Image: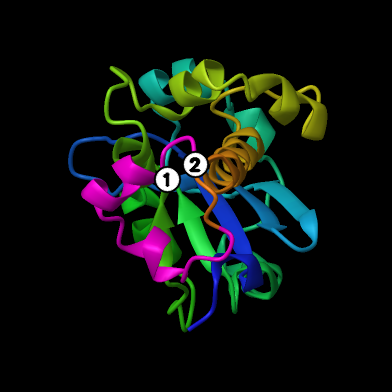
Amino acid sequence: MHTVYQCRFTAIDFESAGAVRGKTDTPVQVGLASWSPESGHSHAFVSYLRTDQPIHWAAQKVHGITAGDLKNAPSLLTLSAGAKKRLSGAIVVAHGKGTEKRFLRAFPGHGFGPWLDTLLLARAAWPDLADHSLGALCDHHCLTEKIQQLVPDRTWHDALFDSVASIILLEYLINSHCLNEQPVDFLLQPDISVWHSRRNC
């Protein structure tokens, strides 16, 4: 079994058109960011995504993406080769993985994984925090400036910014809990009682 140090992690984030009654929500932007304890950060990628569904006003208010941004954007399927290169063989990371797993099912042969949910990890690692949202965690641990340095001119609810934030949070969590030499299953199936004993090791 691989240790955490031997693994490559790729975080993924989607921004969506927003839920509309009677229609399935669709992605309008995807961001990917890779990191490994051995090699550091690499292979960041972002793209708008073509959709036939109008962007709901509530979703646009959150992420600021407009129909004009999507003009001439590729479809999710046409990006499959580049996405597979980044995701294949990697631990796939997301903060609240439900949406990302659902949108990735659009890819032919979509069996990426295993999946690591930084939301579940954060709840195990820092159970006393009142807010485990990605932004609140990064602010609490003073990680936001590092994210901004890696992806300048972007901000929260941009798919690249959020994917980089997820991978930066994971890096911080691994280092602060001394997990590099642990089996990767320690991250994939966090045992809260064990995590408590490892804080500030």
Q: Nearer the viewer, residue 169 or 33?
A: 169
| Residue 48 location, quadrant | top right
Residue extending farthest to the left is: 22
Mark identifier at residue 33? none
Q: Earlier in the sequence, mark 1 or mark 2?
A: 1
Q: Quadrant of residue 57?
A: top left
The residue positioned 54% from the left and 79% from the top of the image is: 2
Q: Is residue 18 above or below residue 24?
A: above
> Is 17 placed left or right of 44 in the picture?
left
Q: What range is drawn magenta here?
A: 180-201
Q: Secondary structure at mark 1?
A: helix
- Judge whether residue 120 can be spotted in this image: no
Horizontal side of 149 relative to 104 (left or right) equals right
- The residue pinned by badge 1 equals 118
Name the residue type under label 1: Thr
Q: Position of residue 195 (x, y in %)?
A: 33, 47
Question: What residue lies at 45% left-to-right and 19% top-to-bottom?
Answer: 136
| Element on which disc 2 rests | loop
Is residue 122 or residue 179 the one in the foreground?
179
- Mark 2 highlights which residue? 201
Position in image of residue 174 (x %, y %): 55, 49
